[in-house]
């Protein structure tokens, strides 16, 4: 997103329904920053077919002017949002739980698997997405040596992406968020950086951290049900 166009973009977003705001936001992303050596950007929104699924998803679940509580992940990964364009949603859950057909390989992604178990426990996709918006601190992903990279993995990457994340985080907060509370998926570095950005930008009064889905599925799989319950309890307070 060109920083000089941000004010115009924000004014336009205020007049649109939630789905249109999200779609306009993703279609306007302009990562005009220089990456450190060895890194590349993963932008699923540049793919016409992916953007078709994005349009279908947001018009299905967000075609209204209601506010949502925002739930911030880290940045898209190759097997979830990096493929479908929809945070924490792999091709299998896009088809089976969101009922949006796609031609992608039917492979599950760990974070998506947890999120949709939680969404089903909450009451299903329609009920969950009516109140919450899954997104990411950084809306674009990164690849380093053919592997996913988090926006905070190196000091050089943090410095390169900082202004971009500031502007896109501010833009996201105008899409229709409740500003009293948001949620952060990741109780370590993601929470640390989101809190620092929020202290600077003043977007949300309170940030509630939750364990990251991938960490749960990798290291606490036997306790998945307890973590789902922790999510549901946290979400029940808003």
Image: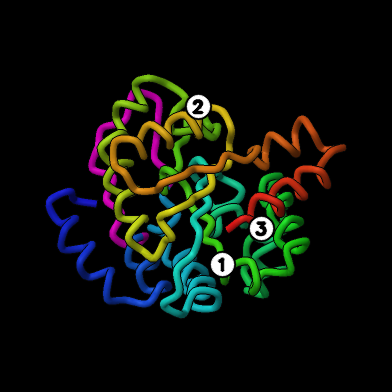
Q: Quadrant of residue 236 in the image?
A: bottom right
Which of the two discs, 2 and 3, labels the residue nearer the N terminus?
Answer: 2
Of residues 125 and 85, the one drawn nearer to the viewer in this rendering: 125
Name the one closer to the observer, 106 or 160: 160
Front residue of 98 and 91: 98
Question: In the rendering, which numbered label is found on residue 184?
Answer: none
Residue at point 42%, 73% (across, down): 19
Residue 236 image label: 3
**Which residue is under mark 2?**
145
Residue at the spot of label 1 = 131
What span is colored magenta in the figure? Answer: 26-42
Q: Quadrant of residue 100?
A: bottom right
Please, what secondary structure does the residue beneath circle 1 have? helix
Q: Position of residue 96 (x, y in %)?
A: 73, 69
- State whether residue 156 appears in this view: yes
Upstream in the sequence, badge 2 or badge 1? 1
């Amino acid at each position: 997103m060109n920083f000089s166009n941000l004010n115009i973009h924000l004014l336009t977003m205020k007049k649109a329904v939630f789905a249109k705001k999200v779609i306009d936001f993703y279609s306007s992303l302009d990562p005009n920053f220089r990456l450190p050596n060895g890194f590349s950007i993963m932008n699923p929104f540049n793919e016409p077919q992916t953007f078709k699924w994005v349009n279908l998803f947001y018009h299905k679940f967000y075609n209204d002017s209601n506010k949502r509580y925002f739930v911030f992940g880290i940045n898209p990964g190759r097997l979830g949002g990096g493929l479908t364009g929809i945070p924490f949603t792999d091709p299998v859950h896009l088809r089976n739980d969101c009922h949006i057909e796609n031609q992608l390989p039917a492979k599950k992604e760990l974070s998506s698997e947890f999120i949709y178990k939680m969404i089903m426990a909450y009451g299903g996709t329609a009920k969950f997405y009516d109140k919450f918006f899954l997104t990411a601190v950084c809306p674009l992903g990164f690849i380093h040596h053919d592997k996913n990279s988090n926006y905070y993995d190196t000091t050089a990457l943090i410095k390169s992406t900082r202004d971009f994340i500031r502007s896109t985080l501010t833009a996201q907060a105008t899409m229709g968020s409740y500003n009293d509370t948001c949620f952060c998926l990741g109780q370590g570095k993601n929470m640390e950086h989101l809190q620092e950005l929020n202290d600077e930008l003043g977007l949300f009064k309170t940030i509630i951290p939750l364990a990251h889905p991938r960490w749960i599925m990798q290291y606490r799989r036997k306790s998945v049900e307890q973590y789902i319950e922790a999510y549901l309890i946290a979400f029940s307070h808003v």
